[in-house]
Image: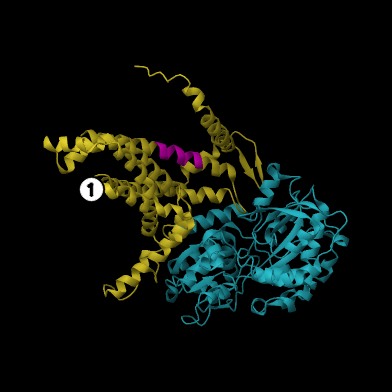
Amino acid sequence: MDDRIRTLYDARLDRRTFLQGTAGAVALSVLGPRLVTRGQSLGGQLNFIGYDGEDARNVAKPFFEANGIQVNPTFIADAFEPLTRFQTGGRGQMDIVSDNKDFMRAVLDGGVEFFMPLDLTRIPNAAGLFEGLKTPSWLYRDGVTYGIPLIWGDEPCVFDPAVWDGPPARYTDFADPSWAGALVLVDDPIANTWLWATSLGFEQPNRLTQAQLDQTIDEMLKTKPNVVTFAATLGDQADVLIRGDATMAVGGWAYQILIAREKGVTLSSASPATDGTFFWSDAYSIALDAPNLDNAYAFIDFMMSPEANAAIASELGSACTIEAALPLVDPLVAALYPYDEVRAPGGVLDTQVVSPPTEDDGDIVGVARWQEAWQRFKLS
Amino acid sequence: MVTRLPAGSLRQLGPATTFYAVFFGIPLMILFVLSFWTQQGFERVPDLTLRNYLDGLTDRLYLQVFLRTILVGLVTSFIVVPLAYVMAYLMRFTFERRGQLLLTLVLISLFSGYLVRIYAWRTILGTGGLLNTALMHLGLIAEPITALIFSPWAVMITLIGLLLPLALLPIWSSMANVSRDHLEAARDLGANGWRLHRTVLLPMVLPGVSTAFAIAFVLAAGDFVVPAMVGGTSGGTLVGNLIANQFRGSGADWPLGAALAFMIMALLVFVYLISVRLLRSVARW
């Protein structure tokens, strides 16, 4: 069995889990040694908590070895796990936190103590970020940066082109009986509800009243008879497509096309013409009271070098965040993502907010209501 | 009559008791305390409220899932245990010489990872899977049967496949202590077929059967991976999935998750005790 697919079988999968040890390692075996610089105060431990693969154990291996840094990774199953650990005795034991855009926005908006303000003079390579990622709204507050984007992407529909020409113009159109037995969604209450709320034309689809949330769920229920299953992860969703148990992944991952190609299966991707889709990004931050601050800064700076950033993007099948890295990214991976979205400030990554409020806010219902509504949708 | 423990047995039980107390008892107590707290945004606030339990008891959503969970656990274990009993009997008494080899072959499946075995079932039950392909080649069906995968049936079939080796072990172990002479004597006295099993063999291996039932029932009712992977839109949620959702992601509510965990635990113990009592009455009947 191919190692990458074995990983898919053995692990809790998301977009960050694939291809470790292949593309990135190959790229850095050539480029890596040139990138290694020894800082005077480096060495010792570096505690990482975040998504599997974003610890860059392949890409940054030369950096760790040359500087005598031992990485202690902790991989997370969901975005809120680092904060939970931080609040339950983990403070003072975390250095690097890698997490997603909506989680970071929620933490900063909620005024929760977790991230350290970053000193950008210690991350000079961050100057090479795409213009649209230099002061992103989900990492930047009052002139202070709390995180550096590592990778990003979108979640289009991925489908079998032998069966479908593409997705319909709107997500609500998936309710048509012609889609019966075709759809696979990821078991993600926030993403799916947001997509259908967008399709219903709500002005702020992440800020819904209870009536609007109910209306969205009612609309989703019209589509449910056409859904084959709710995949546990994006990797699992790819597996369902590859096995032919479904032919249209809603809220998928463009990289699923390359995974399928390796299995001899042809897939295509596109987003509904009217509704579009949502965008994600993962970033590195440093936790408050990080015990290995010098190592943490040096690591982030290393990962923002064009070579390392291109290697991690290729390895994780995602879009890079450093402009000079783009020509170095695997062309097949680079072609999957709309880079125009990050070339200037104010792109869709910056303006789009997917997560609902953490708690009820007047008439606007919080995330717990979304979770509850999703469970009712699944059980109806 | 009071049974006295042999001298020194308490000391021998010490390490295991300490291990369970530290790594099971204390975490369970913490979880129990947590079930009376409340969740506010990202924070868990110390409290002494029964609200989480009342939510679990009064919400139709939770009651529906509790019921479904118990049903899946019972149906699965009532299929798994008889199957395991028959297999153990065949290996012990019919194919006695090859019994150990057969047992090893059955247990080999446990050597692979849990997720790998679930994916293997997907390969068997899928639209383009082994079963559909075989049926189509045999001309028994013209189109693949899509209901084989991503349905409540797929959850049951997969659970049965996963739990059968685990249920087999305690029954086999009990039967290994039953002498063939007992069965021959019973046959000489006129006990054949069902009566032989009900009045002679089953009472002798009842501890093994009860243990197999406990394993199958608790693991089936507590599983949340199989429903998520093969349950589809109609069989994808058991109470384990609801509890898991309360401990991860945005909107997580640990106190509610803890309360749900204790409620299902109490319910499982209750249903298990009733089932074992029924089983014992059948064995004595």
In the image, residue A36 above or below residue A177? above
Chain A, colour shown: cyan
A331 and A22: which is toward the camera: A22
Q: Position of residue B28 (x, y in %)?
A: 55, 36
In the image, residue B114 above or below residue A173? above
Of all residues shown, which one is farthest toward the front?
B97
In the image, residue A20 above or below residue B80? below
Instruction: Give the chain letter for yellow.
Output: B
Q: Residue at x 45, y 62 (%)?
A: B119
Query: Quadrant of residue A42 in the image?
Result: bottom right
Query: Quadrant of residue B185 in the image?
Result: top left
Q: Is residue B216 left or right of residue A336?
A: left
Would residue A226 be seen by someone viewing this image from the given angle? yes
Q: Residue at x 60, y 55 (%)?
A: A77
Instruction: Residue type at mark 1: give it.
Output: Thr
Report the residue marked by disc 1: B94
Residue B267 sits inside the magenta stretch: yes
In the image, residue B3 above or below residue B254? above
User: Label 1 is found on which chain of the structure?
Assistant: B
Q: Residue at x 62, y 55 (%)?
A: A78
Main SS, magenta residues: helix
Q: Is residue B138 left or right of residue A209?
A: left
Would residue A321 be seen by someone viewing this image from the given angle? no
Q: Position of residue B265 (x, y in %)?
A: 46, 39
A262 and A271: which is toward the camera: A262
Residue range (magenta): B261-269
